[in-house]
Amino acid sequence: MAQDLFQSPDYFNIDELLTDEQKLIRESVRNYVKKDISPIIEEYAQQAKFPEQIVKQLGDLGCFGPTVPQQYGGGGLDYVSYGLMMQELERGDSGVRSTASVQGSLVMFPIFAYGNEEQKNKYLPKLASGEWLGCFGLTEPNYGSDPSSMITNFKDAGDHVILNGSKMWISNAPYSKVAVVWAKNENGEIQGLILERGMEGFTTPETHGKWSLRASATGELVFDNVKVPKENILPGVKGLKGPLSCLTKARFGIAWGAVGAAMDCYDTALRYSKERIQFDRPIGGFQLQQKKLAEMITEITKAQLLNWRVGVLMDKGKATPQQVSMAKRNGCEIATNIARDARQILGGMGITGEFSVMRHMMNLESVITYEGTHDVHLLITGMDVTGINAFK
């Protein structure tokens, strides 16, 4: 069984910027990862199995909807605390963080932000506790970066609507009890609907053959004349604002999570460089290896500071979607590069399950793509600074 020796890098004493409560929250999640995730995750990833037991564990730990008010089962925490939780979960595995991210930012957040009291009271406590797992349906087979062109639609049928269409690349789908689905009404307006497993015509086939996020459950959502009660429509929003606001919350968590993966790769490579002897000395004593390690810790430190700042802005209600977009892209880019450099430092051992680096490297290939690709986030920043839309 793998022993987790992780020591968190903090080159600029960023801990001094955190409150005691934030550090305590981070420590509790870090200890959970060391105790319950690290010893098992390689085996689950190798077998491409989802560790179902983590759903209840994450609920008990408060990782589902930590910023949702306590009256609905959430933690009522600040966004920096939420980011630290996601950082520690992804330090263990991107798939574990994805499970929590989807549940909190993409399922619980829209119900809290756009649902009525009946919907909030029915769904949020069960999602927060981990009794129910949820998923988020936006991406379609033919429309990923262009969600406005979605085909999934619903038509009025009296006291219910009839939903048709499909979604793909949906984290948590095969195990979800609840799905928040975005579809067009008869006027072409996008609205959110809450679906429950068991509705006739609603199926969630699992996606197999992944080389990335192998310990995460991914599937499709298929709607074949599904009768959805009108009381399951989210009343508080119409248009792309709904799903895009959810993605902003999720991207915030990803920004922190990706840096957690980078921290783990750096820590692994640093330790290995001090222990691996070649030419009668540790490889950490050679210039090219020190260059890699120095660049890793520099990029991690910059990303930690960027994430902390956007977290502070989120807590003040001042963070823009464009700022969150930059943090997501930056975190994913530096993490992907660090994982590759760490693999090089480990040499052949870097491709084995004895170390976490190759698993992180493969996972990050998904993380850099979902919730907005690297290129799309570049264009978001480009449009923000120039005022010119390059998407069309």
Image: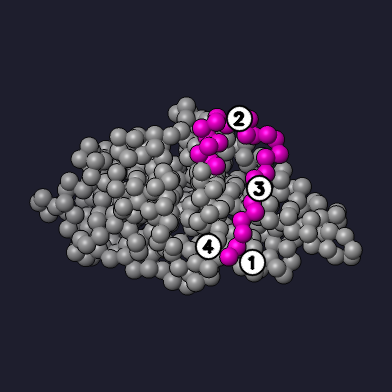
Please rate how many residues cluster around mark 2, counting C-alpha atoms within 10 Å: few if below 14, some from 14 to 19, many from 20: few
Q: Which residue is mark 2?
A: 17
Q: Which residue is mark 1?
A: 354
Between the C-alphas of marks 2 and 4, the distance is: 31 Å
Between the C-alphas of marks 4 and 1, the distance is: 11 Å
- Decide whether residue 6 is among the magenta residues: yes
Vertical arrangement, residue 15 with respect to residue 131, above or below:
above
For the magenta stretch, what is the residue range? Answer: 1-27
Q: Position of residue 311 (x, y in %)?
A: 52, 34
Q: Mark on residue 41?
A: 4
- Decide whether residue 314 is among the magenta residues: no
Residue type (three-letter) at the residue carrying disc 3: Gln
Name the residue furthest left: 158
Please rate how many residues cluster around mark 3, counting C-alpha atoms within 10 Å: few if below 14, some from 14 to 19, many from 20: few
Please rate how many residues cluster around mark 1, counting C-alpha atoms within 10 Å: few if below 14, some from 14 to 19, many from 20: few
Where disc 3 sits, the SS reads loop
Quarter of the view holding residue 218: bottom left
Residue type (three-letter) at the residue carrying disc 4: Ile
